[in-house]
Structures are given as C-alpha cells and as structure tokens.
C-alpha cells in the first residue's frame, strides 16, 4: 500500500510538471508578436509583379516575383527594413538558373507600393543603388494592396 501511494504521488508530480511546461509554451506563443502580412500586385495584360511582406516593427521579410512579357521570370526573397514610408531591402532571386542579389526600394503610398529606380553598381557581388539621392519612383506601375492568398 505504501508503494502504491508513493507511486501514485510520483506520477501526479510528473504530470503536474509536464502540464506546467505546456502552459508555459502556450503562454509564450500567445505573447510573441506576430508579423503583419501584406500582399501587393501590379498586373496588366502581359506583365505581373507580386510581393508578399511579413512585417514585424520595421523589419521586413517576404517574397517578390517579376513576370514580364517575353522576359525571363525571376522570383526570390526580400530581407530589409522600413525607413518611414520607404522599404529598402535585399532581393535574392533566381533568373535563368543563376542566383543574384540586388537592392530594391519601394515607397509605400496609401495602399500602393511604388518601386524606385536609379543608377546601380556592383558591391561585393550585390547590385546596390550607387546614388540614393537620384532614385526615382515609377508611379505608372504601382503595386496595389490585395488580399493575400
């Protein structure tokens, strides 16, 4: 009888400890901030640009894809930061079987993301904007906010 009571107490103690760990994990998952997910797209009859962003504070991760008519499609990942209303990110993509990285910049204007263009130069294998003061944003091809799928 004594061993039964001792065994029963030991089992209850183990279950109680295990339960606490599960509750701690659930509590941590509930308190960890979740990123905002936003999707944008430009589309006309022949061209498509799609972007999905995961935003946590000023930090951004995401996906970007360009599919222009009669040009090679490229798709890849974004890693960058918002500086006010401007997203500056490294875009690592695959095109024609080759991986490349280049800097991209987008201006957030209402429900649109407008891509910036300007002179670029190679810096350690990555194309970056060589003169940030001369970047121009092309408002003729804005990416519009859409529902993420």
Image (tube, grey):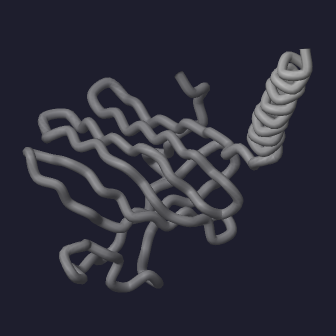
Q: Nearer the viewer, residue 136 or 35?
A: 35
Q: Nearer the viewer, residue 114 or 17?
A: 17
Q: Nearer the viewer, residue 2 or 14?
A: 2
- Residue 68, x across and y down, in percent: 24, 38
130 vs 71: above or below: below
Residue 23, quarter of picture: top right
At x 25%, y 72%, the residue is 127
At x 62%, y 39%, the residue is 37
- Residue 3, x across and y down, in percent: 84, 21
- Residue 141, x across and y down, in percent: 43, 45
Residue 128, quarter of picture: bottom left
83 vs 42: above or below: below
Q: Quadrant of the N terminus?
A: top right
83 vs 79: above or below: below
At x 27%, y 28%, the residue is 46
- Residue 136, x across and y down, in percent: 44, 69
Q: Is residue 6 left or right of residue 36?
A: right
Q: Is residue 90 left or right of residue 36?
A: left
Q: Is residue 55 left or right of residue 136?
A: right
Count the labels in the image.
0
Residue 112, quarter of picture: top right
At x 30%, y 33%, the residue is 47
121 vs 45: above or below: below
């Amino acid at each position: 009888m004594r061993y039964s009571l001792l065994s029963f107490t030991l089992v209850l103690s183990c279950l109680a400890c295990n339960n606490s760990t599960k509750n701690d994990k659930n509590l941590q998952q509930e308190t960890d901030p979740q990123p905002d997910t936003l999707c944008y797209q430009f589309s006309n009859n022949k061209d498509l640009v799609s972007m999905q962003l995961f935003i946590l504070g000023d930090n951004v991760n995401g996906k970007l894809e360009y599919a222009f008519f009669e040009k090679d499609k490229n798709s890849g990942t974004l890693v960058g930061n918002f500086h006010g209303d401007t997203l500056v990110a490294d875009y690592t993509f695959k095109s024609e079987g080759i991986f490349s990285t280049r800097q991209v910049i987008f201006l957030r204007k209402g429900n649109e993301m407008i891509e910036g263009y300007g002179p670029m130069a190679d810096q350690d294998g990555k194309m970056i904007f060589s003169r940030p003061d001369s970047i121009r944003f092309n408002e003729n091809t804005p990416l519009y906010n859409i529902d993420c799928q």
